[in-house]
Image (tube, coloured by chain):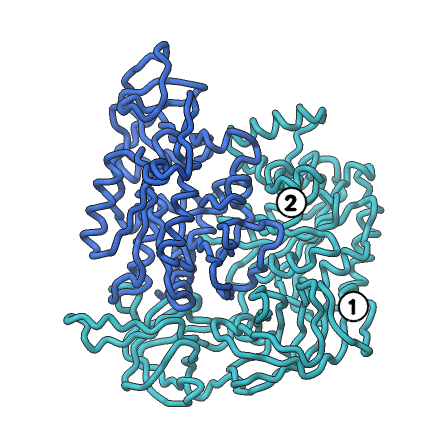
Chain colours: A cyan, B blue
Amino acid sequence: MEVLKIATAGSVDDGKSTLIGRILYDTKSLTTDKLEAIEKTSKQRGYDYLDFSLATDGLVAEREQGITIDVAHIYFSTAKKSYIIADTPGHVEYTRNMVTGASTSQASIILIDARKGVIEQTNRHFFINNLLRVKDIVVAINKMDLVDYSEETYNKIKADFEALMSKRDYQGQKITFIPVSALKGDNVVNKTDKMPWYEGQTLLEHLEEIDKADIFNIGTPRFPVQYVIRPKTEEFHDFRGYAGKVYGGNLSVGDDIVVLPSQTKSKIKDIYFYNEEYETASRRSSVTITLEDDINVSRGDMIVKDGDLPTIDKQFTANVCWMDSNQLTAGSKYIVQHGINKVLAKVDAIHHKIHPDYSGIDTEVSGLGVNDIASITFKLNKPIFYDQFKNHRTNGSFILIDPQTNNTVGAGFIQ
Amino acid sequence: MNKDTSHINSLENEAIYIMREVAAQFEKPVLLFSGGKDSITLVRLAVKAFYPAKIPFPLMHIDTGHNFPETIEFRDRLVKELGLELIVRNVQDSIDQGKVKEETGRYSSRNQLQTTTLLDAIEEFKFDACIGGARRDEEKARAKERIFSVRDDFGQWDEKNQRPELFDMLNGDIEHGQNVRVFPISNWTELDVWSYIEKEDIEIPSIYFAHKRKVFLRDGMIWSAEDDVVYRDENEEVIEELVRFRTVGDMSCTAAVLSDAVSISKVVQEIRESTISERGARIDDKRSEAAMEKRKQQGYF
């Protein structure tokens, strides 16, 4: 069975939590006791319908304010797929959570309130999905019941969104429009008869057909060494294995490789997964590799195929999404965590701030506030081995850590 | 490894990656072991992550003193077979030292008292990372938990100010005195855990399988009457039923379910068909809708 990770984005009151609750309900993923709790609370509050948002809004503050304020993960499965939904908040001030949710997702659902149409928040949600190069986007036009299931309204919103699409950098995205009512259950899991003018799939039908192989960026293999395994037991006296996860493409026994940064060459001798040996380590598998030659490899080094080297440099330029309340300013120092590798970095130049609603850029920038996105050049105290984000999702991204607070304060996508 | 794209394999690869990050990023990690299926799964994943070397950190059991005897036997055997180091700290000691007060009455439980014993043990051993088997599908507040979840000097969880986690980059940087709770099976569901136990043929304590037990009914739930740990009114009648446990926590707050599942494949089948969520049998979460979140803020696991 496959697993599909989906991020959801929408504004306050677009009905995102209700939509997820509806999916859970209609796929019979809500257990009896959870359903009873929802019925009980809905009744206590005097609603004349079931408030499915209660299924997902986890924190007390959220239930009090009736809004979602952090990324929640929701799990359900159908006969065909396992789904993980990252339910991310839609407020302006919580953009960082949206970036977080989208970073691990293969598909995204952008919710639009049919009564309001495309608003500034929609631009922002689309921008972030575009920045993170999420491959499959569903634009769910919700609350169709409140606009009399009007085809005209749907077409107007679709046209407005298509105008937005012309501004995107990443053209490879597949975008699908679906008119729904999460509250009434129209076109979420089950097809409705209220909108005969819509001939497409329901939301779930669409998700079921997303091809996982299509979604991942297949790049070149990159193997950052996470941990060196040296058992020092009698049985495995000379064993020296390099544990890590394979990114981008496969690695096989006999491959000619180069270890970075030393640029020492060797060959892959064995590939282990626990006590079994394999000929090939596939993308995203956590394996242990041994090399033909006895060379010095430690955590943070990277094993790549000979002739297929990433950029090795002490500086790079990236689009950064700033996530901290303390400002980022030129000259300040941060830790760049690139995969598992941590290096000290200095902000060399802030080139321009990018308005995440497609309204242009600012070239006069003194600093970045929370949720700002900007193009920045960093200088590093030692080289890292990177690819451009557009070519390598993993090896082209990084996070920024504030050495004073240890907090994760930003995320970057190397240009 | 060529065709390793199935759901359970990708979860396993993710968990192994997290285990290795813990070993690499922290000085004194520990694996919190309860004897339950989730922590048994964690041990299996840790074995796989570091093979052929041994797991480079100890296990720690916070013993409420109200464990099912089968769990303790199982724990000791597992540790011996794998040659692991086990640390045990007892809630009874915290009670004796006057640090916590035993609850009394019908719904009394030592579940909450564990927090104090855990925090004291973290301080005693200066653990900087505690690996736990919590899963996001268990409960609404846990759905918001990070994989690396930072706790302050008081073991508290600041749920509104969590570090964002992007891609699979895990930031384990902390200040002295802080620690990180690590959840390698965050993205697993109850069914995933059971499917994994079946696939890997992992041994688990016998109370997870259907067995005859003296029980009594209260509030629509089935409680064990075989020990004096669970408070029972005289008018609450003891009957014998075929039951099994879906979670194995403190006996005082873990209810049984009627079941005839005597093997792992039967359990997997039962869970697939089940309509009551796992924590539905945990009375501690039912105290109020926000029960879990409140306990977590106080440092509960």
Mark 2 → mark 1, Cα distance in angstroms:
33 Å
Q: Which mark is first along the chain, 1 or 2?
A: 2
Chain of the residue displaying label 1: A
Chain of the residue displaying label 2: A
Which residue does the image show at 79% across and 67% down from the upper left? Answer: A358
From the viewer's side, name the closer residue of B164 and A302.
B164
The three-letter amino acid code for the residue at tag 2 is Thr
Residue receiving disc 2: A202
Q: Nearer the viewer, mark 2 or mark 1?
A: 1
Give residue B56's quadrant in the image. Answer: bottom left
The three-letter amino acid code for the residue at tag 1 is His
Residue contact at pointers 2 and 1, CB within 8 angstroms: no
**In-image side of A277 versus B152 (left or right):** left
* SS type, badge 2: loop
Residue A139 seen anywhere in this rendered image of the structure: yes
How crowded pointer 1 is (Cα within 10 Å; few <14, some 14-19, many 20+) is rated as some
Residue receiving disc 1: A355
Q: Position of residue B130 (x, y in %)?
A: 40, 54
Vertical order, B169 against B280 (above or below) = below
**In-image side of A113 versus A403 (left or right):** right
Which residue does the image show at 47% across and 41% down from the upper left? Answer: B138
Q: Residue furthest top?
A: B235
